[in-house]
Amino acid sequence: MSAAAAAQASAVGLPVAELETPALVIEIDRLQRNLSRAAEYAAAHGLDLYPHSKTHKTREIAELQLAAGAAGLTTAKSTEAEIFASALGAPLVLHYPVVGPEKVARVAEVAGRVPLTIALDSVEAAEPIAEALRARGTEAQALIELDVGLARTGLDPEQALELGRAIGGFGGGLRLAGLSCYPGHLRHDEQVVEAGIREVDSTLERARGMFEEAGLDCGRISGGSTATLFHSHETPMSEIRPGNYALLDRQEARGEFELADCALHVHTTVVSNAVPGRFIVDAGAKTLSEAGPPPGAGGHAEVVGRDGLEIELLSEEHGHGVVGADARPPAVGERLELIPNHACTCVNLHDLLYAARDGLVEAELPVIARGAVR
C-alpha cells in the first residue's frame, strides 16, 4: 500500500465527508443490488456467471460476487489471474491472448492451483501453453474465441474449427471445452444491442453446429458483457462474463441500468473558483482517467445532484469545471461527488476504495490487482 493509502488506514467508521479527497467511494447497497440482479438473472436462465475482475480489482468485491452465486471470476492479464488465484482460489477464466514465455509460465503455475480456462485464437499462443501445462503435469480448459463483430480478437467459425482440431492434437495440457466471444461493439443504444445480439446468436449457432458435426467438444459457450447482459439468454451462451455491472459508470448506465445504480462515486473538493464561470476540483486525469463520455453526453464525469455543473476538461491533477448560466457556482472547499465516465480505468489509478453505507465508511478495499497489465 502506498504512503497516501496508509495515511487513511483508520478510515473505517469515519463519515465519508471526512475522507481526504480525491477518494473513491463504493456505495455498498448499490453494489449489492447490482450483484444480485446479475446473479439472479444468470440463475433464472441457467447461465454460469464469471464476473470480470478488471472492473474492481479487489478481493472483497470478488468474494461478494462468489457469495452471490458466481461460478468463478474472469481475468484479462496473467498477473491478474496470478493475484486472484492467490487471493481466492476460485475457478478462473483468462480471456486474453497469452503470448510470451514469462506469461506462459505464470499461467501454467496458476493452472496448478485453481481450475483454469483460457480463451485462445491462435496456434501460436495455444501450443506453448499446452507444452508448459504438460511439463507441469497439469491441465487447463480451452475456449476458442470467435469474433462476433468487435474485430479485436477472435476467429471466424471456420478458423475456430481448425484451431479446435489443432488443440485436440497437442497430446494434452489443453483440453478443448467450447467457444467464447465478447460482443463489446454492442453498447449505448438498446436498439443496436437488440439487433446485434441476433447476429451474435447466428455466429455462435453456426460455430456450435460445425464443432458438433466435427465431434469437437462445445459444452461451454462463454460470452456476454454489461451492455448485453440481460440479452445473453437469447443466444447459445452457457456462461457470461460481465464486469462493469458491479460498479457501473456513465458509459454503462444505459438500458437496464441508470445513473442511480452507479455504485462508484469519486469524492472531490473544489480547490479554486478564481476564473469567473469556472471551478477546479482536485480530481484530474490521474484520478478519473481520460475515458470519454457516452454518446450524447459531454464532459469527463457526472456531477451528482448539481445540475448545471460540468467537468469539461482534465489536466493531470485538475478537473476543469464549468458553471451553467442558471447554476450556483461551487465554493472553494465545497465537496462534490462525481460518477466517472469509465469505472475500470478509474479504479486502476487508485490503491484503495472505501466501501460506505449511510454516509459512513464500513470497509477499506485494497485494489490488489492495480497495474496488473502483464
Image: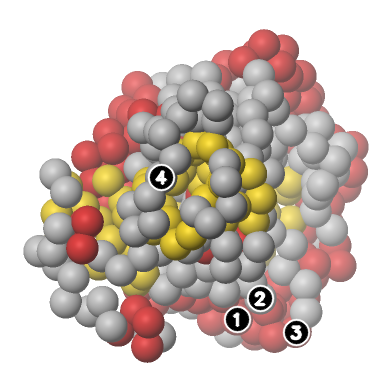
Question: What SS does tag 2 mark?
Answer: loop
Dot 3 and dot 4 residues touching (CB under 8 Å) = no
Query: What is the CA distance from the residue labelled 3 to the residue labelled 4?
Result: 53 Å
Q: Which residue is mark 2?
A: 374
> What number of labels is visible?
4
Residue at position x 14%, y 44% in the image: 358
Who comes first in sequence, dot 2 or dot 3? 3
Under mark 4, the amino acid is Pro
Residue 346 visible here: no
Which image quadrant: the N terminus? Answer: bottom left
In-front residue for pair 43/159? 43
Residue at position x 37%, y 82% in the image: 4
The numbered disc on residue 330 is 4
Which image quadrant: the C terminus? Answer: bottom right
The numbered disc on residue 106 is 1
Query: What is the CA distance from the residue labelled 2 to the residue labelled 3?
Result: 12 Å
- Position above or below: 108 against 303: below
Question: What SS does tag 1 mark?
Answer: helix
226 sits to left or right of 204: left
The location of residue 324, given as percent across then percent down, is 55, 30
Who comes first in sequence, dot 4 or dot 2? 4
Who comes first in sequence, dot 1 or dot 2? 1
The nearer-to-camera label among 4 and 2 is: 4
